[in-house]
């Protein structure tokens, strides 16, 4: 999926959460892009190292 479509999908996912009062993990508020275990090949290395986006 290209960056633009990913961005739209991510934006829509957050809209659905807000519209339906779905709680999210506090790590997203701290700037993590994705919640992943250390073994996940999709995990962003900065997130695993604790360097979150602010």
Image: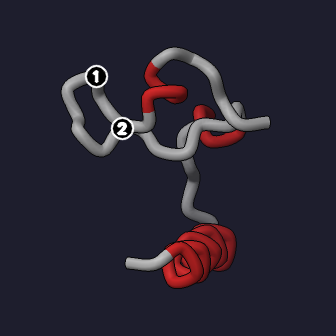
Lateral position of residue 15 relative to residue 24, left or right = right
Tag 2 secondary structure:
loop
Question: Residue 41 falls in which quadrant of the image?
Answer: top left
Separation of residues labelled 2 and 1 (CA atoms): 7 Å
Task: Residue at 55%, 62% (x, y): give it.
Answer: 22
- Residue 3: horizontal and vertical position, in percent? 53, 73
Task: Residue at 63%, 21% (x, y): give it.
Answer: 51
Circle 2 residue: 43
Mark 2 crowd level (few <14, some 14–19, many ≥20, 10 Å Cα): some
Instruction: Tell me how the rendering is colored.
Output: secondary structure
Lateral position of residue 19 relative to residue 5, left or right = right
Q: Is residue 16 visible?
A: no
Lateral position of residue 39 relative to residue 26, left or right = left
Circle 1 residue: 38
Task: Residue at 44%, 37% (x, y): give it.
Answer: 44
**Would you place residue 13 above or below residue 26 in this image?**
below
Verify CB contact (< 8 Å) between mark 2 and mark 1.
Answer: yes
């Amino acid at each position: 999926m290209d960056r633009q479509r990913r961005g739209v999908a991510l934006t829509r996912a957050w809209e659905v959460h807000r519209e339906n009062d779905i709680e999210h993990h506090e790590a997203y508020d701290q700037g993590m892009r994705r919640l992943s275990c250390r073994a996940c090949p999709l995990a962003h290395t900065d997130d695993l190292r604790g360097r979150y986006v602010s």
